[in-house]
Image (spheres, grey):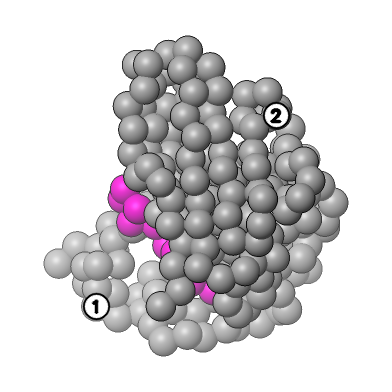
């Protein structure tokens, strides 16, 4: 069956360090996105991961803090840099153009991050 | 600005019907989505509306009125496992292609 996986599933990190989250899809997709969901809140789009070029960031998110890679059509990484407790959140990747309807975004299982 | 409103919480009884409303104001409209999210899990796709009317899928139906900026998700024959948050999301125009704007979610509690 089709799968979207994320690694790690959870982590506890010290402030000032960085964590790289991986998202892997088992088939090629048109688009990949990274979202954040803070405790008790809804989802906020961080950026669109573009294959072979720089990611497109939403207002309030910058490349220095959240560098993103997408080397091919099935894989992307999000790095949370110089972490602070405010970065404690669930980070979710989503994909579009994977299974019909093609307009729909499907989410990975998420990475639960706690920064101490 | 862009805004999506839905009730914060709802309670319903097992076996009953519940309707979760969503109103939106966005810069353009290119589809409305409903997702279900159980506590501690990722959102799962429920329905997609881009034209006015009702889309039915088993126990779940979703309705859209673009002129009113309004949608609802209808859950029939409620089961205990339907206790979850239900997220309304709209894709507008402009900005990042495919950008979904999410409401804050409606937490549904199904009681015996």
Q: Which residue is mark 1?
A: B15
Which region shows up in magenta? Answer: B34-48
Please identify the quarter of the rendering in which residue B64 is found.
bottom right
The residue where tag 2 is placed is A63
Residue A24 drawn at (x, y percent): 50, 57
Q: Quadrant of residue B67?
A: bottom right
Residue at the image position 64 percent from the left and 67 percent from the top: A29
Which residue is nearer to you in this view: A108 or B80? A108
Q: Is B43 included in the stretch rendered in magenta?
A: yes
Count how many numbered circles sit on residues in the image. Answer: 2
**Which residue is nearer to you in this view: A93 or B5?**
A93
Identify the residue at image location x=71%, y=79%: B52
Q: How far across and how far down the image is residue A111, in percent?
A: 40, 42
| Rendered location of residue B31, percent (x, y) | 70, 67
Image position of B59 (left or right of A29): left
A49 vs A73: above or below: above
Q: Quadrant of residue A113?
A: top left
């Amino acid at each position: 069956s089709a799968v979207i996986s994320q690694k790690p599933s959870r982590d506890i990190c010290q402030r000032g360090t960085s964590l790289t989250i991986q998202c892997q899809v088992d088939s090629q997709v048109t688009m990949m996105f990274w979202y954040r969901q803070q405790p008790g809140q809804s989802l906020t789009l961080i950026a669109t991961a573009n294959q072979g070029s720089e990611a497109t960031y939403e207002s309030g998110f910058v490349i220095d803090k959240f560098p993103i890679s997408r080397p091919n059509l099935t894989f992307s990484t999000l790095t949370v840099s110089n972490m602070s407790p405010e970065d404690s959140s669930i980070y979710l990747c989503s994909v579009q153009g994977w299974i019909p309807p093609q307009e729909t975004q499907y989410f990975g299982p998420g990475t639960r991050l706690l920064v101490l | 600005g862009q805004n999506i409103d839905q009730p914060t919480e709802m309670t319903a009884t097992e076996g009953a019907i519940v309707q979760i409303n969503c109103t939106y104001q966005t810069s353009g409209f290119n589809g409305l989505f409903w997702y279900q999210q159980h506590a501690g899990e990722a959102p799962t796709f429920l329905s997609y509306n881009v034209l006015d009317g009702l889309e039915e899928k088993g126990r779940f139906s979703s309705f859209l009125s673009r002129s009113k900026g309004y949608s609802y998700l209808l859950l029939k024959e409620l089961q205990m496992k339907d206790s979850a948050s239900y997220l309304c999301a709209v894709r507008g125009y402009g900005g990042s292609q495919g950008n979904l704007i999410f409401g804050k979610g409606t937490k549904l509690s199904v009681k015996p």
